[in-house]
């Protein structure tokens, strides 16, 4: 199966990418500022929601239930959507989805498409497929537009241009929009974007969207956003095409109540999304007259088949785990080499894409648990990270691996108290070449990563267990005497 | 009470003074300590790094050694988290009903040190004396897995002579994360530098925690930068009295 498409191309390992990014002072400042602001807003609006923990538990239960009956709900959605005048297409992988969408655009004679932010289209590399077929996609979400005009890559699930500040946005706009005058005041930048976009909204006949939720009972689609560009994309054009991962389905319209409370508070620290667009099929004389939904698998059923990892599919793409992650906050999203970054990216990417660099991602976490704590659908990300590490270790089992040899040796040391004691003695004797003036300042090999910035105390003269024996003896003598 | 001590492999090997302090403290409070010499490691390092197969026998050993204990005291929240969060699932994976039951029965008797003192023994004032400016680092496992919350601080506030100062950004990871500090040394270092800045800003002489793993990391950076700030496990502060100051103090 070939799923290495578009944005999912091979990238350097997380460690290598992070090493470079850590030197980018501007990027780190931007990422730190943005994640602090969003996290701060989130904390306030989550605190005011009295039943937050119940909402999380409910959302998790709905997702679990839906995934356990995914086949039924997808067919139910197809029937309801078709009955309402929509067309449902099924795509097993990225290539098939790209082909279906490009063919539809060609069939309607389109040369341009207006897009409302969709991660799934980045996942399958849709923009590249469009361009290869002479179709020009226009990103209309402000941040996505900044990324597109800046010939850049998204660095955050919710705020793809989070790594840019307004001075940089000004430069991009001036260059790409051919403006001679522009300040970096938010209002000026917004006006420039608005002018640029309005023309596209009015002119382009084909709209393209992702989906936050697919409603199985009504066949409806729901997209939430903050700028109104999405509302334009799903109402103004004659033709609307939606791409959705199959995990985006929820059983019924009523379930939106739970998710429309959780998502905005988690994602942007808003009580409600400014724009919540919901549509079902087509309505004569109102909105798009042709509506197509492409349901995408692209590895999702493979994730579903793994009981230890299937909670990955609960994700509603709020980005809260990125904003709180101490690793993401240092590097930003580009270190993850995938459209899906941060803690959720570290579990999604290795499962979706069969790539070399994605093997480094499950290790890009200190397992601090901050991601699990904020996740609105209770994905135990640390647990899945550990599970994926186990999978990587099993797949890489070869005797020549230094880490594996070390780990196995340690396991043997820990197999009895006597062996541990012998190893402690050996360590005390063997450490002298590395000890200088009572400290360990340089260690060889991988352990050198520790001593690069940290000193270490040598092994003390006496282990605890050895002291304990003496202590026991003293106590006994004390009691006898 | 008869308390079985699981000292953990790295405390045993690298931080014996923490173990001695736990023993001294609990004996001072009138309890009887038992230390089964067969104990080694809970398996956390293997489990979290992906060597779950190698962690299995370590889990089985732990359960076998401590299954009859009245209570088990562990001066490390991350090892307690390993046992609480993962042992039930690991036992289940073996399909051995005896082991599943043993884990289920043992878990409620496993306590991190501050949990044991405050929740089980109902004591906050342990009669400690520690005349130093101290800041408390909340390790990730103590915060998000054990949900210790204020427990260690409640104990520290009762220590005589202590000048306790709050650490900013207390919920941020120090960047240790076990093998993370080696595998992602650069990002770990970046995280550590932020933690060190917060610790230095408190102007404390001593940074304490319930995990020597984080403290080893934080101290590694503090010492490399010659800040002069020490790190000391909570047990050592609680064991310290006017008559018998902490081990470290006695040496200096």
Image (spheres, coloured by chain):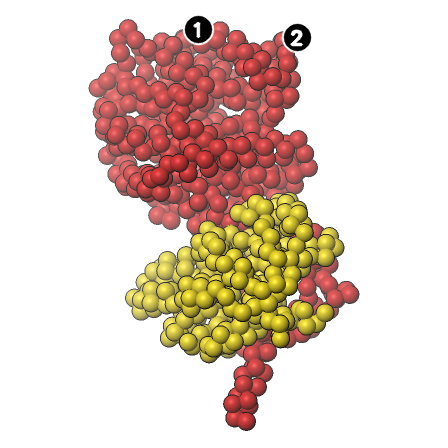
Chain colours: A red, B yellow
Judge whether A438 appears above or below A126 on screen. below
Where residue A255 sits: x, y (%)? Answer: 28, 32
Q: Nearer the viewer, mark 1 or mark 2?
A: 2
Image position of B49 (left or right of A216): right
Residue assigned mark 2: A180
- Output the chain of dot 1: A
Residue assigned mark 1: A202
From the image, which quarter does the N terminus of chain A lie in? top left
Where residue A155 sits: x, y (%)? Answer: 55, 31
Query: Which tag, 1 or 2, sits closer to the chain's start?
Result: 2
- Output the chain of dot 2: A
Judge whether A332 appears above or below B66 on screen. above
Image position of B203 (left or right of A382): right
Image position of A279 (left or right of B212): left
Compare residues A52 and A316 and report the one nearer the observer: A52
- Which residue corresponds to the image point at 42% horizontal and 66% vertical from the top-left? B122
- Which residue corresponds to the image point at 55% horizontal and 75% vertical from the top-left? B24
Compare residues B85 and A266 and report the one nearer the observer: A266
* Separation of marks 1 and 2 at Cα, in angstroms: 25 Å
The answer to whether residue B76 shows anywhere in this view is no
Compare residues A297 and A19 and report the one nearer the observer: A19
């Amino acid at each position: 199966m070939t799923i290495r498409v578009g944005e999912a191309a091979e990238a350097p390992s997380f460690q290598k990418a992070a090493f470079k990014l850590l030197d980018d002072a501007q990027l780190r400042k931007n990422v730190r500022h943005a994640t602090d602001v969003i996290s701060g807003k989130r904390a306030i609006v989550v605190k005011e929601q009295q039943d937050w923990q119940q909402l999380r538990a409910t959302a998790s239960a709905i997702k679990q239930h839906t995934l356990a009956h995914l086949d039924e709900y997808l067919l139910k959605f197809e029937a309801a959507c078709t009955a309402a005048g929509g067309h449902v297409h099924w795509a097993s992988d990225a290539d098939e989805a790209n082909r279906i969408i490009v063919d539809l655009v060609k069939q309607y004679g389109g040369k341009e498409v207006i897009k409302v932010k969709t991660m799934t289209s980045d996942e399958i590399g849709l923009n590249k497929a469009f361009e290869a077929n002479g179709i020009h996609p226009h990103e209309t979400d402000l941040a996505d537009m900044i990324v597109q005009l800046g010939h850049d890559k998204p660095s955050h699930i919710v705020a793809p241009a989070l790594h840019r500040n307004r001075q940089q946005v000004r430069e991009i706009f001036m260059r790409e929009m051919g403006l001679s005058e522009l300040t970096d005041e938010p209002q000026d930048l917004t006006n420039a974007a608005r002018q640029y976009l309005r023309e596209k909204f009015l002119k382009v006949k084909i709209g393209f969207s992702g989906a936050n939720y697919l409603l199985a009972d009504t066949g409806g689609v729901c997209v939430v956003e903050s700028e109104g560009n999405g509302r334009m994309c799903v109402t103004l054009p004659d033709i609307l095409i939606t791409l959705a991962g199959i995990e985006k389905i929820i059983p019924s319209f009523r379930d939106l109540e739970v998710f429309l409370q959780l998502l905005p508070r988690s994602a942007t620290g808003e009580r409600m999304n400014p724009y919540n667009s919901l549509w079902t099929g087509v309505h004569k004389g109102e909105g798009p007259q042709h509506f197509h939904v492409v349901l995408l698998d692209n590895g999702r059923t493979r994730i579903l088949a793994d009981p230890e990892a299937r909670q990955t599919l609960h994700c509603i793409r709020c980005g809260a785990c990125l904003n709180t992650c101490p690793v993401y906050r240092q590097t930003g999203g580009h270190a993850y080499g995938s459209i899906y970054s941060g803690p959720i990216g570290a579990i999604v990417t290795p499962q979706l894409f069969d790539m070399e660099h994605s093997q480094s991602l499950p290790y890009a976490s200190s397992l601090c648990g901050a991601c699990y704590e904020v996740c609105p659908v209770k994905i135990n990300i640390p647990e899945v990270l550990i599970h994926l590490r186990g999978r990587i270790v099993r797949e890489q089992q070869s005797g020549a691996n230094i880490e594996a040899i070390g780990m196995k040796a340690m396991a043997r040391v820990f197999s009895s108290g006597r062996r541990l004691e012998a190893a402690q003695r050996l360590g005390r004797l063997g450490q002298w070449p590395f000890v200088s003036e009572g400290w360990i300042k340089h260690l060889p090999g991988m352990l050198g990563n520790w001593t690069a910035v940290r000193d270490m105390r040598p092994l003390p003269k006496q282990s605890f267990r050895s002291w304990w024996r003496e202590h026991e003896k003293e106590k006994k003598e004390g009691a006898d005497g | 009470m008869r308390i079985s001590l699981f000292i953990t492999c790295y405390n045993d090997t690298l931080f014996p003074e923490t173990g001695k302090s736990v023993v001294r403290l609990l004996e001072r409070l009138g309890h009887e300590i038992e230390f089964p010499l067969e104990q080694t490691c809970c398996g956390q390092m293997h489990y979290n790094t992906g060597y779950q197969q190698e962690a299995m026998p370590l889990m089985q050993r732990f359960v076998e050694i401590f299954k009859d204990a009245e209570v088990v005291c562990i001066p490390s929240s991350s090892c307690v988290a390993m046992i609480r969060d993962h042992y039930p699932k690991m036992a289940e994976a073996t399909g051995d009903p005896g082991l599943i039951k043993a884990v289920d029965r043992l878990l409620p008797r496993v306590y991190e040190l501050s949990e044991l003192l405050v929740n089980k023994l109902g004591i906050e004032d342990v009669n400690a004396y520690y005349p130093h400016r101290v800041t408390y680092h909340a390790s990730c496992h103590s915060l998000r897995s054990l949900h210790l919350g204020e427990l260690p601080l409640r104990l520290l506030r009762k220590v005589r002579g202590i000048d306790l100062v709050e650490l900013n950004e207390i919920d941020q990871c120090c960047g240790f994360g076990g093998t993370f500090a080696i595998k992602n040394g650069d990002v770990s270092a970046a995280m550590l530098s932020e933690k060190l800045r917060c610790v230095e800003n408190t102007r404390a002489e001593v940074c304490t925690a319930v995990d020597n793993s984080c403290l080893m990391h934080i101290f590694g950076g503090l010492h490399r930068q010659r800040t002069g700030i020490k790190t000391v496990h909570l047990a050592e502060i609680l064991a310290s009295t006017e008559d018998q100051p902490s081990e470290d103090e006695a040496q200096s």
